[in-house]
Image: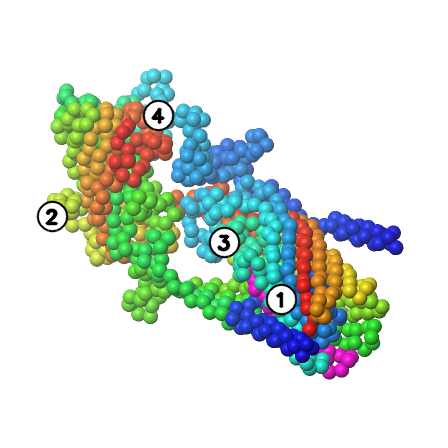
Amino acid sequence: MLFKQISIAVSIVGLVLAASACSKTEGRMTDYSELGYTECSSSDDCLPFSYCRMTDDGGDSGLCWADCRNVEDCRAISSELICKDFACVDPDTLVDGDADAEDDSGGECVPGTETNLSCLYIAPEACEGQGWVSNCADRYCYDNGFRYACQKVGEGECTTREPCEGKCVDMCVVDLIEGDETAADGDDPSDGEVAAGEASAWTGVWGIIFTTAARTTGLPLVPHQDTVSIHHSLVRVSQDGDDVVFLSNLCLLEMHNFKDDKVYAIGEDLAQMVVPDAYYQNLGMLKHVLKDAPALESGVEFETERWWEVRGAEIDDPTCTVKDYEQEDVCGSDLPDRAAFEGGDERVWDMDYDGFPGQTTRMVGLLPGDVYSDQRWSSRLVGTVADADHLYGVVPNTNRQYQLGASDPVLLYDTITAIHPEQSRSYFRLLRMSDNATCEDVMEQAHTPGSWLEFTVHVDDRTEP
Amino acid sequence: MDRLNQLMKVGLSGFMLWMIFTAGGFLAFDAQAAPFRMTGYDTAAIGSANSEIVYGSSYGVLSTNPALMSRYEPSSSIEFILMKPSLKVNLMDRPQNADISIMLYNTQIDKYKNNPDVALPTSELRESRADHNVDELLTYISTGITYSFGIKGFRAGGFLILPVMEQIDAKLKYYDERESFFSNTVHLARFGEWSPQITGMLGVSYSPIKYVSFGAALQASAMLVAGMDIYVPDAQVQDYALTNAETTVTGKLRPIIGVQVEPLDWMALGITWKWRSYAEVDGSGKMQLWNFHETFEAAEEAQTTPKRVTIDSDFVLDYEPMELTGGLGFRYAGWNIQGAFTWNRWVDYRDDHAQRPQESAVYASADPRFDEDGVLIYGPSYFTGDDYKWSDTFSTNIGTSWQYVDWAKTSLGFSWYNSPVPAQTGRTSYADSDTWCLALGQRFDFTILEQNFNAALGFQFWQMIQRTVYKNAGRIQDEFPDDSITPIELAEVEAAKGLQTNNPGFPGYTVKGWMIVSSLSLGFEF
């Protein structure tokens, strides 16, 4: 009897073990080489928005990938990492990437040597007609340093609306003396007004972060929309007698929505306006003049004159008187609004050369599409010297903008935009750089945590170099 | 004394029936708590692998064949049931570039308009993709009764099962890449991942003559209707909104009909039919935003019209299929043995989000591809979901018991449940496999103060057969389409090339495991 019970028990256990051992497999193991990934041997294979991530096996090939768009994406991994060419990397491991223009002519740079860099040449009188500095075409070359200038190579009248073909030429030196903006034409750059004094200490090439915070009302969904425009520019500070001239060549313009101290990354908010390259690459340069420059010593305060700029339209007199709260008062010429544009106002022009009137910005998120607008704004720098290499301050500015049209009528609203009431959100910080500094150097500083040119919400967040 | 005992029995049985009916009325209980469909609802059923189709001895037959209530003495019992699963879904390693790069944010979002469930970059998912283990202990207390009310051949019965830890806990899941927004793993679909719920059943049986008995029972399923109205004063402030919720519960009944025919003292037949059952939840709600209007083009005439948004959501909880069971049993000299086959109609299955598997398997591709002749080779109509439709199954339950002395009985049972889930080589991952069960039971009868009591133990060991699934990459949604472009430069992004998906089941997974069920009961015969 006992033997029988044991036999049954053993049989049951055997049955259980046998059944437990059963298994089945379905489908076919995926061959990863069939998944369509882009193989690469260097990041050049992955341009413009990815890098080559090497495989873990230590080989010399990899797959195109992007870790990040900006340093904020990397901070989710580690606060020590920065975003470099779409890869989160430890900045200490980077080889010096200083892209300063090097003298590659064996020490004998010949002024006027043509480079392979293209530009749009605009005649000085046409530049001035738009209210820009007379050498406005040089902006296309200044991304590579202020030693370059734009020289006409094509035919035509070279107006703002129909610029000529041009080439960047190497002037070998950075002209830090005001008085001749057409150095590319071969004139002597040293015939400007030179005077000894405090002004000369300011001269050089600087990088700047320049923010303007605005509040827009009249939009759907939200009571108002706060937006900060973050400009990073390469600045040539030159001397004109006792005066100092800040000439800013824009490297990058980004717009971000914000709510209180939370600044949204692009795509983070429900709807966001982004600025296409063509928008800021065709803007005029800003020229802020500091009269009777004081000594460049810590704690010294300074204030430049106001600079007016019109975008997307060409008007006779862009200047206005300014009343309290940085509001336009009486203007020399009115800015064309949508009604004027629809009525055939020819002062509106396609400033970014994209085939649409005015300047084109792009909405992403809930309401995607393009918006066409014109704008008049002005700014001045009211700052303090932190030390001989660091300046900071606020940017009082006026702003008027009209929506002229949109790719989707849903995007057209009669909005009102005013500067943000917190002045500390519209600020600048200037950092002295080498004379051969480029926009790439400026942006490297901009993306370096703790840098003087890194974006902070308020100017007060970083006033100690 | 006899009269007093009789009055006590009537009073006690009436009180218990009232309790169960009352609970059914006010708790709006859901009779579907799915594990019991397979394990059985009481200790006697657990000890015989839920095989009581032809012969039965306790209220658990309300589910298997309510006609059997007329075949045993009126009784009641209280039970403690414990379930300990150890089930695993192990996910295979993914190729690195299957992740979705954060560059997704810098591409034109309207590119994905064919796919309303726009993906998140993998690095920003709330949960990292990980294996899934189901090992939470489930405990229940159950009580039930069968009573005759002095009518020969008639029985009324009912029972109620209450989870000890949590009363109602419904955790909904997606079974495709949409689950990446939530738990980011693969979940068990049919066996093992059950939501604790209050469970109950009521029924009657009548045997007009010795040879036949009829029975019927009702499972009451709760249908929860939940609506939510939302007003968002400031769309920039996503963590603040005014909300009003409205919930109502309505009952939904599932009939069970059973017949037992006993032409000979040593042989009987049983047939049971159950309608399918699930709890359906309407989760629709309305949302209004500040200063948000219809465009003039959308309105009949140019006027300012507030835009109010209605979000429709349907949920289905604890789906159980329609079942038809036929069984045959024999008994002789203290032995009885019975076996049954059940046809389970799974083709109508609906998952937690009220979708049929064949519907979930097909997706609207944002990345259709065409051959040189312009013929679609990859896209919305590249394949139908027919390969992923669940199939009907036949399951079997076999049980035997031996009354070797007047006061003790031992039972043994075995059951086999085929998986209705086809090979999950596509978008969906309803993790499931064939399962079998071995059961053992022991019952002791005893008398105290001339009253008949019994105590019983039940034990089940469940095994899920290991099942490994490899995905067909061509049937996985590419959530970062190859032709994605940046909104500003209109440039392609190399990190988007090839298959990127957050589907936790890609490139494959293995499901396996076991579960132990044990129960203890104390019964009283009227």
Please say if A26 is above or below B79: above
Q: What residue range appears in magenta? A: B196-216
Q: CA distance from mark 4 to mark 2?
A: 45 Å
Q: Are marks 3 and 1 in contact (CB under 8 Å)?
A: no
Query: Which residue shows up at 18% across the image and 37% down it?
Result: A380
- Local packing at callout 3 (Cα closer than 10 Å; few below 14, some 14-19, many 20+) is many
Counting from the top left corner in percent of width and height, residue A324 is at: 13, 46
Q: Are marks 1 and 2 in contact (CB under 8 Å)?
A: no
Q: CA distance from mark 1 to mark 2?
A: 88 Å
Which residue is labeled 1 in the image?
B143
Question: What amino acid does circle 2 point to?
Answer: Val
Which residue is labeled 3 in the image?
B366
- Local packing at callout 1 (Cα closer than 10 Å; few below 14, some 14-19, many 20+) is many
- Local packing at callout 2 (Cα closer than 10 Å; few below 14, some 14-19, many 20+) is few
Query: Which residue shows up at 27% across the image and 29% down it?
Result: A464
In the drawing, what numbered circle is on residue A330?
2
- The chain holding disc 3 is B
Q: Nearer the viewer, residue B216 or B485?
A: B216
Q: Are marks 3 and 4 on the same chain?
A: no
Counting from the top left corner in percent of width and height, residue A392 is at: 23, 32
Structure colour scheme: rainbow
Q: Are marks 3 and 1 on the same chain?
A: yes
Q: Secondary structure at mark 4?
A: loop
Q: Is residue B154 left or right of residue B304?
A: right
Q: Are marks 2 and 3 in contact (CB under 8 Å)?
A: no
Q: Secondary structure at mark 3?
A: loop
Q: CA distance from mark 3 to mark 4?
A: 44 Å
Q: CA distance from mark 2 to mark 3?
A: 53 Å
Kindly give the residue lying farthest to the top in the view shown: A107
Per the picture, the main secondary structure of the magenta-coloured stretch is strand
Which residue is labeled 4 in the image?
A100
